[in-house]
Amino acid sequence: MDTDFIRLDGVEKVFDVRKKTGFLRSERRQVRAVDSISFTVSRGEMVGYIGPNGAGKSTTIKMLTGILTPSGGRLRVAGIDPSRERTRLAQRIGVVFGQRTTLWWDLPLIDSYRLMHRMYRIPDARYAENLDRCVELLELGELLDVPVRQLSLGQRMRGDIAAALLHDPEVLYLDEPTIGLDVISKARVREFLRDLNAERGTTVLLTTHDLSDIEQLCRRVMVIDHGRLMYDGPLTGLHEIGESERTLVVDLERELPPIEVESARVVKVEGPRQWLAFPAAQSAAPLVARIAAEYPLVDLSVREPDIEAVISRMYAEKATS
Amino acid sequence: MVRAWRLYAAVAAGGFRRYATYRVATAAGVFTNTVFGLILAYTYIALWDERPGLGGYDQAQAVTYVWVGQGLLSVVAVMGGGFEDELIERIRTGDIAIDLYRPADLQAWWLAADAGRAAFQLLGRGVVPMVFGGLVFQLALPGDAGTWLAFLVAVVLGVLVSFAIRYLVALAAFWFMDGAGVQQLAVLAGLFFSGMTLPLNVFPGALGELARVLPWSALVQAPADVLLGERTGLALLRTYAFQAAWAVGLLAVGRLVQSAATRRVVVQGG
């Protein structure tokens, strides 16, 4: 039970898509949004679920919440068949859709929480305790009396995350929780999720476009594309397979010829700023140390490869091998 | 069961507060209702001068009918503008998915929210036009609390029927990409068949018969007749039964359509 807290066996989701081909004629076409996916997630794990647009991520999440019924295969969350017992499962899961909100638009944030209190039948003491905790950690104190429509995107997202956690869910599904957020808001959300997982043992399944979300939160990552599971393992392994490269951006004191250093190559120079590409699986630390020792370094940053690039490299790799 | 009530009570309270936040909109609504009330009242006076006793009302009753109608306009949402705009938007954008995974009943949720809205609008937009009408015109209002109470019951039943109709209209958005057409049709039918434009008892023949048995007559005509003292005793019970039958029937149809819509979403995706 604990090692296969979430279990999918050959899960499929096929949509009928009707396409107009003439005045009255239409063509039926079947789209396999999810094509025979199998995986398990242990209790307390924090897993990244990534893939390009239309890969089937949201469809999987919807099946895991019971909103969508699988067309085939077997699916269990905490031993429950989601689409059959959606309401029972709802008590045990929390869901945050980054681009949608569960909050009441016209009313103060606190009103939405009071509603959650009643909806999930949370015991009063438990509700008060959880609310206090979320308010403190997500810094919602001053926002509780503000109507949701007046919140910024980052504030609203924190509000939504709190709303999903008031009933102590054992699993939290997050669909693009950092989309559109600024750097500070992103950092705050990630820190909160890390603590939640560490302290409460909440199982977290996270879909995202932002590889740095995964990098900072998840030891394990699953890649889905065209409805199929392409990769399941640590993030470093993904980089190895994808042969992807990270980018080190360095600001030097002055304009200099391209930096010459082992295991990295300069891909762009713009005044005192230079861009160096190096294998993603390799640590940046020795590279930075060497550059700092030999060049007048002012500032630096490391950029992660984007998910599309990693996946397209994975394909190229498969095609040639 | 008791705990479920607490949830829907909280939803209704939220619905009430939500409309209470928009004070300017409420004031503008009251103003519009009052102006329309004046126009209609003078039109009715001219009409009843020409045809005294039209539809069985005397002139004071006819003018009272106008102000009751204006008071109820937003309460029973004859022109729309209740929860349905939001529900249609949620269906269109796919936000409905969020509502579906919640451990709450969709229809009961929206009914509670709409009941909260109706309660606010009865106080916020119903009372002032009535009082204004009473100050400017000689109204035939009942003096006993019993009739007022009977009227309130008829209003509650009217709100239920109104909700049931609008719920069906909103659910149509699951099948039509754009819910606006169905909504406009419903508003048009509502304006006429509720008795908002003219009392339904002035219409002769088959049209009158039809208008009086359609569900919309439960929204304005029925409560107005109760207040005017036209329905007492057995007739009052018959009126309630008529309203309740439509409410139960349409709510049941709403449930069927809701489960078909949910199945469609669950199988077909958002």
Image: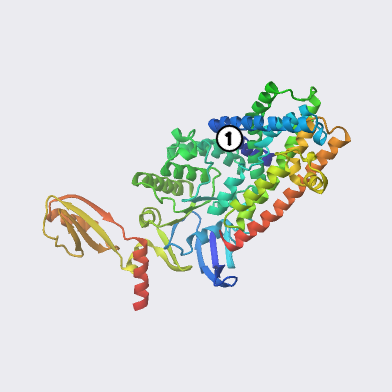
Q: Badge 1, how many Cα within 10 Å: few under 14, some, many 20+? A: many
Establish if A64 lies above or below B156. Answer: below
Q: Please name the residue shown 17% across and 64% down the image.
A: A262
Q: Which residue is mark 1?
A: B19
**Picture quarter with the C terminus of chain A:** bottom left
Please provide percent x and percent y for residue A245. 28, 64
> Residue B18 appears in which quarter of the rendering?
top right
Asked whether, in this view, residue A8 is left or right of residue B136, the answer is: left
Residue closest to the eye, B77 or B191: B191
Please provide percent x and percent y for residue A157. 45, 45
Please provide percent x and percent y for residue B234. 88, 36
Q: Please name the residue shown 48% across and 46% down the image.
A: A200
Hey, what amino acid is under mark 1? Tyr
Residue closest to the eye, A175 or A198: A175
Q: Is residue A131 visible?
A: yes
Establish if A96 lies above or below A142. Answer: below
